[in-house]
Amino acid sequence: MRWLPRSWRQFWSTLDGRLYHFLVDVRPWIGWFAVGTMVFTFGLVFWWVPLEAVQGYPQKIFYIHVPSAWLAYTAFGLVFVASILYLWQRSRLWDIFARCAAEIGFLFTTLTLVTGMLWGRPIWGAFWTWDARLTTTLILWFIYGGYLLLRAFARPGADIGRIAAVVGIIGFLDVPIIHMSVLWWRTLHPAPVVMILDDPGGGLPTSMLVTLLVSLSSFTLVFVYLLIQRVWQERTAENLDLLETLLDRTDRAARTKGRIS
Amino acid sequence: MTWYLFAYVAFWAALFGYLLGLSSRQARLNRRAAELTGRLIARAGGRDT
Amino acid sequence: MSTFAPALAILAKDVRLELRRVESLATMTVFAGLVILIFAFVGDPTPADLARVGPGALWASILFAGALGFERWFAEEERNAALHGLLLAPVDREMLFLGKWAGGTLFLLALEALLVPAAATLYRLDLGGRWAAFAALLIVVTIGYAALGTFFAAVAARTTASQLLLPVLLFPLSVPLLLAGIEGGQALAAGEAGDYRDWLGLALAFDVLFGTVCTMAFGTVIEE
């Protein structure tokens, strides 16, 4: 039973080391695979999947809008998990992971909002309606924008990773409550007429479902690649910082020694 | 039709923008790594003589 | 009661400080009044419009003034490194938070005691005599907002732009409370007791959840 970790701490440090290095090693493969599936997805969207009868072309936005939203929410779930792990294990990797996941999640939330607005314009006749889901996504965008700003404005010397982890946890806990309150807020008012739109999940034809699933997986691959790449960059930057301080310090020590002798 | 093309252009612009940022960050990292390696090599040379 | 003695001591200290120099509370009141004034320019001030904008104006003024206050009440501790003294005291971090939280709630309620009658007069808000129910809603929402505000003031204090960052972090997370205040109040005015109770329940659940989480997490944020 040598391979069994002796404690949780050891298990995590093993995961921290081995899994991380494995992912960093296979990173280019994931990247190229993501590019391939992405090309395939767009081939399907442009040439294969039939036009939707009622909406026509604008419905094709569906295939980038839904995966973006899915990745946005997944990313913020990852921030939540990584924040808890960071507060528990205090391993630098989880702090970096949370930051990078928030950054990429913010990117995909922006994409969700932008593609959603460009879809809403031809279908609802307006870029924006104060629908519960739209409003929640906008608030989510603000919460994680604030989270990234908090990290950017960190006072020098403050352990911002620990504080950001707490904010990441509280922000994520708040999202379901925000959604519920916004839902009540809308349903207590008369529903806007523009909201008459088929539920995208129900009764989806097979070809559209296949395209959506392919799109979801290719987006997820892109996300995984971006995340590994960013985490690796941040970690390398920290290692370089460490090397630089070591070099500076020993250089200074060597110089003073030379002066004394 | 135009809205749908708009959405795809916006999507690709954002993704490529992010990738561009990623690669410029990478270039900066590589430059720093090369510089620090140079310092390490110089020091090793100095100690040998 | 002795377990809460440190929290009460901090509360007493904050109240005494605030009573000695009422400037900050006075400035906040004036600021909140100005927000109410500005909201009157939003629509045509016909009585129907006023009644529609009124609750939003009231809660927006509380939200904005609160964000200013929380930042200030926490910055007070940072001056002369008073916070270091508090941290060195053999007191649980939870007690520190409870004391500051209670203080924030109290000051905000004092502000609202002036603000609500003013807004009700200027915007001709009519609750049909259900003032006690409205006061209950006000208190519940204020408790939750003070919990988040006190907590995020401590978070924002760790940055170089705390005045800028506190509203950015605080407002999106306070949306459920804001909606509970506005919608609960309007349900009350319209005599919809069921809706009022739902919103009050939501605000109460918010208080319990974030009161607990913020109390527990305060130590993590505050420590050097």
Image (cartoon, rainbow, N blue to C red):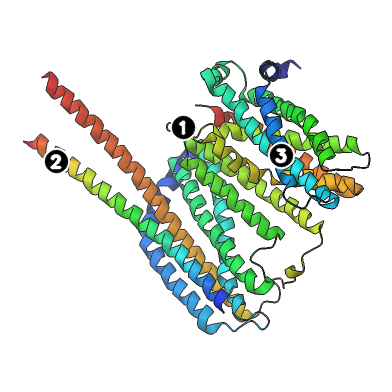
Q: Which mark is residue C61?
A: 3
Q: Chain of mark 2?
A: B
Q: Are marks 3 and 1 on the same chain?
A: no
Specify the quadrant that holds the N terminus of chain B.
Answer: bottom right
Q: Is residue A209 visible?
A: yes
Q: Are marks 3 and 2 on the same chain?
A: no
Residue nearer the viewer, A151 or A23: A151
Question: How far separated are the C-alphas under marks 3 and 1?
Answer: 32 Å
Of discs 3 and 2, which sits in the foreground?
Answer: 3
Question: How far separated are the C-alphas under marks 3 and 2?
Answer: 63 Å
* In this view, C211 is above or below A176: above
Specify the quadrant that holds the C terminus of chain B.
Answer: top left
Image coords of residue B29 (percent x, y):
31, 50
Image coords of residue C213 (percent x, y):
66, 36
Q: Viewed as shown, does residue C63 lie left or right of C189?
A: left
Q: Is residue A81 visible?
A: no
Give the residue type at disc 1.
Answer: Ala
Q: Residues within 10 Å of mark 3 (few under 14, many from 20)?
A: many
Which residue shows up at 48% across the image and 44% down it?
Answer: A94
Give the residue type at disc 2.
Answer: Ala
Secondary structure of the residue carrying tag 2 is: helix
Secondary structure of the residue carrying tag 3 is: helix
Q: Chain of mark 3?
A: C
Which residue shows up at 66% across the image and 63% down it?
Answer: A128
Q: Are marks 3 and 2 in contact (CB under 8 Å)?
A: no
Image coords of residue C10 (percent x, y):
66, 18
Question: How far separated are the C-alphas under marks 1 and 2?
Answer: 35 Å
Q: Name the residue that disc number 1 marks.
A: A158
Secondary structure of the residue carrying tag 1 is: loop
* In this view, C35 is above or below A126: above
Q: Are marks 1 and 2 in contact (CB under 8 Å)?
A: no
